[in-house]
Amino acid sequence: MQPDKIHWSALEYEHRDRSNDWFWVVGIIALALAVISIIYDNILFAILIVIGTFTLLMYAARAPHMVDFEINRRGVIIKDRLYPYNALKSFWLRDNHRGRKLVIQSEKMLMPNITIPLSDDMDINTIHLFLVEYLEEQEHHESLSELIMDYLGF
């Protein structure tokens, strides 16, 4: 018998320990890009680079929070936000050297893929049997930008 809902908690992202050198390199590259933008009379872009880098460094320094996830008959719930099945296209369960994840393709243009980490004790077959009733199963590969960001340590 299939459950009415599947609930678990996991860290919102995989935390990586970054050395002081990593922060210095990111800061120096950002500063160089901002100076080049100023040389080319693009002050607004320089400000955007500085603000974006500051935000990135603050986000990289903080520890991930524990997030509650739930899959039920209405849709997928992340924290307190419901993503109904009619706003989702397909799903794929990824289990490889980079971790266990549920990838859901959304109808939204600004957030096409929703990647949800799975805890180690989650049964992937249970999730698969539950979601296949509501969504199409379609393989989702990691995008080039995801691979590059992972390689750079983001």
Image (cartoon, rainbow, N blue to C red):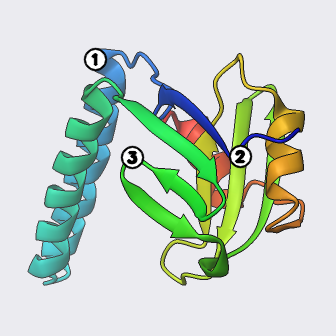
Mark 3, residue position? 79
Residue type (three-letter) at the residue carrying disc 1: Asn
Frontmost of labels 2 and 1 is 2
The residue drawn where x is 41% and y is 35% is 67
Mark 2 / mark 1, whichever is N-terminal: 1
Secondary structure state at the residue bearing disc 2: strand
The label shown at residue 82 is none
| Local crowd size for mark 2, using a 10 Å CA cut-off: few (<14), some (14–19), many (≥20) | some
Secondary structure at numbered mark 3: loop
Residue on which the image places disc 1: 20
Question: Residue at horizontal 71%, vertical 46%?
Answer: 102
Q: In the rendered view, does 146 fall on the left or right side of 125?
A: left
Helix, strand or loop at mark 1:
helix
How far apart marks 2 and 1 lie (CA) works out to: 32 Å
Sooner in the amino-acid sequence: mark 3 or mark 1? 1
Instruction: Give the labeled residue for mark 2.
Output: 102
